[in-house]
Amino acid sequence: MSEILEKLAMPLPDIRTLPSVEARLIIAFRLAVIASKNDYDCRDQLSDRLGGDRAATRILIIAETIGFAWPEPFQIGRPCCSLTTPDEIWLIAAIRLAACENRPGFDALSCEMLSGDARERIYNDLRGFVATYAGTRG
């Protein structure tokens, strides 16, 4: 039990300390969420950050899917903020699991928050993003 409390007491990582690919994904996701809430087409900016239009479209789809499925508003930091949120750290962990095709790990990470149908949609959208994003980086 004390191990869990220690983890809860640890501050969330500063975005500047994350691997560059993870920081880039968090910033792109922030932009996607903010743009979708303000009816702004940010596809060009996302395409520049993510290496192509398909990756930009896929992250917009993820933002929409998570927005509908998440039990509370998905918490993102301001674009200029270096602090990460628990939800952003969840997103990075979920992307890692999808990239490794670790569905059981993704389900374990998400089962307390999301229904089976929501997990299915999000996991499939994450896999689509990972495949597209990996193709832009190759």
Image (cartoon, rainbow, N blue to C red):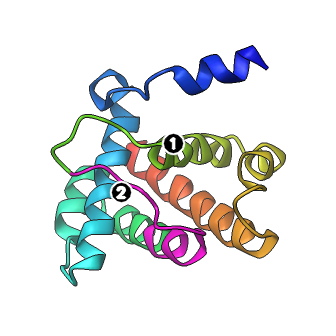
The reply to whether the magenta stretch includes residue 40 is: no
Q: Is residue 92 left or right of residue 29?
A: right
Depth order, front residue of 30/45: 30
Depth order, front residue of 87/105: 87
Q: What residue did someone put label 1 on?
A: 92
The reply to whether the magenta stretch includes residue 71 is: yes
Q: Position of residue 65 (x, y in %)?
A: 54, 74
Q: Name the amino acid type tagged 2.
A: Phe
Q: Which residue occupies 31% across, 42% down?
A: 24
Q: CA distance from mark 1 to mark 2?
A: 10 Å
Query: What SS does tag 1 mark?
Result: helix
Q: Position of residue 81 (x, y in %)?
A: 20, 41
Give the tally of numbered discs: 2
Depth order, front residue of 127/108: 108
Q: Which residue occupies 24% across, 34% down?
A: 82
- Confirm whether residue 51 shows in the render: no
Q: Is residue 12 above or below residue 117?
A: above
Q: Is residue 126 above or below residue 15?
A: below
Question: Marks 2 and 1: in contact by CB < 8 Å?
Answer: no
Q: Is residue 128 above or below residue 24?
A: below
Query: What SS does tag 2 mark?
Result: helix
Quarter of the figure with the C terminus: top left
Q: Position of residue 41 (x, y in %)?
A: 20, 78
Q: What residue did someone put label 2 on?
A: 29
Crowd class of label 1 (few under 14; some 14 to 19; many from 20; radius 10 Å): some
Report the span colored magenta: 63-78
Among all residues in the image, which is located at the extreme right?
Answer: 104
Q: Is residue 50 above or below residue 58?
A: above
Q: Earlier in the sequence, mark 1 or mark 2?
A: 2
Q: Which mark is residue 111?
A: none
Q: Name the amino acid type tagged 1.
A: Ile
